[in-house]
Image (cartoon, grey):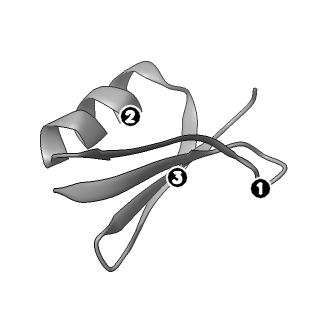
Amino acid sequence: MKSIKVVKQDGSTLLSKEGTDLDILELTTYLRHERLEYQGNTAYIYLKAY
């Protein structure tokens, strides 16, 4: 399991959850994201606009 964090443009966390690589793929498919970043066992999805 990985820690997944969805981060808004201002740097605040919108969503924080545990999930798999498939969960990360689903979130990046449906969210308008600027970039996806991995740090260790954590995936950060930075949103384009919110």
Q: Please identify, in this view, whether the residue under mark 3 or under mark 1 is nearer the observer.
A: 1
Judging depth in this view, the residue of 15 and 44 nearest the camera is 15
Residue 30: x percent and y percent? 41, 19
Query: Which residue does the image show at 35% across and 26% down from the upper left?
Result: 29
Amino acid under disc 1: Gly
Quadrant showing the C terminus: top right
Give the crowd class for mark 1: few <14, some 14-19, many >=20 residues within 10 Å: few
Which residue lies under the disc numbered 2?
28
Would you identify the image quadrant in which residue 32 lies?
Answer: top right
Judging depth in this view, the residue of 3 and 50 nearest the camera is 3
Amino acid under disc 3: Arg
Quadrant showing the N terminus: bottom left
First in sequence: mark 2 or mark 3?
2
Does dot 2 land on a helix, a strand or a loop? helix
Between the residue at mark 3 and the residue at mark 1, the CA separation in whole angstroms equals 13 Å
Q: Please identify, in this view, whether the residue under mark 1 or under mark 2 is nearer the observer.
A: 1
Give the crowd class for mark 3: few <14, some 14-19, many >=20 residues within 10 Å: few
Which residue lies under the disc numbered 1?
11
Amino acid under disc 2: Thr
Between the residue at mark 2 and the residue at mark 3, the CA separation in whole angstroms equals 9 Å
First in sequence: mark 1 or mark 2?
1
Residue 2: x percent and y percent? 24, 58
Query: Which residue does the image show at 39% across and 51% down from the upper left?
Result: 4
First in sequence: mark 3 or mark 1?
1
Which residue lies under the disc numbered 3?
35
Does dot 3 land on a helix, a strand or a loop? strand
Between the residue at mark 1 and the residue at mark 2, the CA separation in whole angstroms equals 18 Å
- Whether tag 2 and tag 3 are in contact, CB under 8 A, the answer is no
Q: Is residue 7 above or below residue 31?
A: below
Residue 49: x percent and y percent? 74, 30
Residue 38 placement, left or right of 22: right
Residue 28 placement, left or right of 46: left
